[in-house]
Amino acid sequence: MRAIKFPIKHLAFLLLVLVGSTSMCLYWSRITDAGPAKSASSSVLKPKPLSDFYPRWYGARELLIHHRDPYGDAVNREIQMAFYGKELDPSLPEDRQDQQRFAYPLYFVFFVAPMVGMEFHTARIVFWWVLAVCAVVNVLLWLRFLRLRLSPLAL
């Protein structure tokens, strides 16, 4: 076997990519964990650290399992209670923010349907991996479409 020689530029670029990726992962993990908790006032329920996938998953779950309207006020109230620890009042200036509702077209339910039987934490991890695989496949398909051949390191 012969040793693979990496030019210093490639190693520096790889290190830069790894540092950038790690810092973004840390940033987003802290933002999504702290966001709802800071915005909720003292209320009866303690808000959970949820991602923006939660309203979509919960709306799909309510439609497919409990046969409820995902756009209805009751489902929106439950999403806000889980996300912020209280129901938001649009008449209050501090509550005029992203109110976390099921706001997607109804066909989105079919993408999330396989995950509605799972707990949210599990569904979030599964959905993240599905999106990661889709991103990799997307890049590979674009490379094939553009007829680009890259070295394994560049890929």
Image (cartoon, helix red, strand yellow):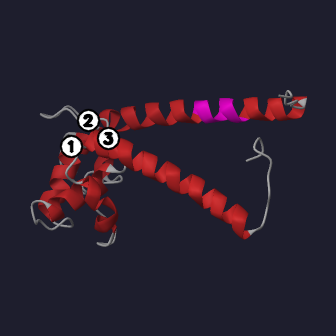
Residue at mark 3 = 50
Q: CA distance from mark 3 to mark 1?
A: 8 Å
- In which quarter of the view is residue 107 placed? bottom left
- Residue at 32 percent across and 54 percent down: it is 96
Whether pointer 1 and pointer 2 mark residues with C-beta atoms closer than 8 Å, the reply is yes
Q: Position of residue 29 (x, y in %)?
A: 45, 33
Residue for badge 2: 48
| Cβ atoms at labels 3 and 1 below 8 Å apart | yes
- Say if mark 2 contacts mark 3, CB within 8 Å: yes
The x and y percentages for residue 89 are 21, 53
What span is colored magenta in the figure? 17-23
Q: Which mark is residue 40?
A: none
Indicate which disc, 3 or 1, sits on the residue closer to the N terminus: 3
Q: Residue at x 59, y 30 (%)?
A: 22
Q: Residue 26 in the image: x percent, y percent? A: 52, 30
- Does residue 27 appear left or right of residue 21 in this picture? left
The amino acid pointed to by label 2 is: Lys
Q: Amino acid at mark 3?
A: Leu
Left or right: 89, with 25 as reference point? left
Location of residue 141 in the rendering, given as x and y in whole percent from the top left corner? 64, 64
Give the spatial CA distance, label 2 vs label 3: 6 Å
Residue under pointer 1: 82
Up/down of 2 relative to 60, above or below: above
Residue 51 seen from this side: no
SS of the residue at dot 3? Answer: loop
The prevailing secondary structure element of the residues shown in magenta is helix
Q: Residue at x 84, y 35 (%)?
A: 10
- Please tell me whether mark 1 sits on a helix, a strand or a loop: helix
Residue 62 is at least partly visible in this image: yes
Closer to us: 105 or 80:
105
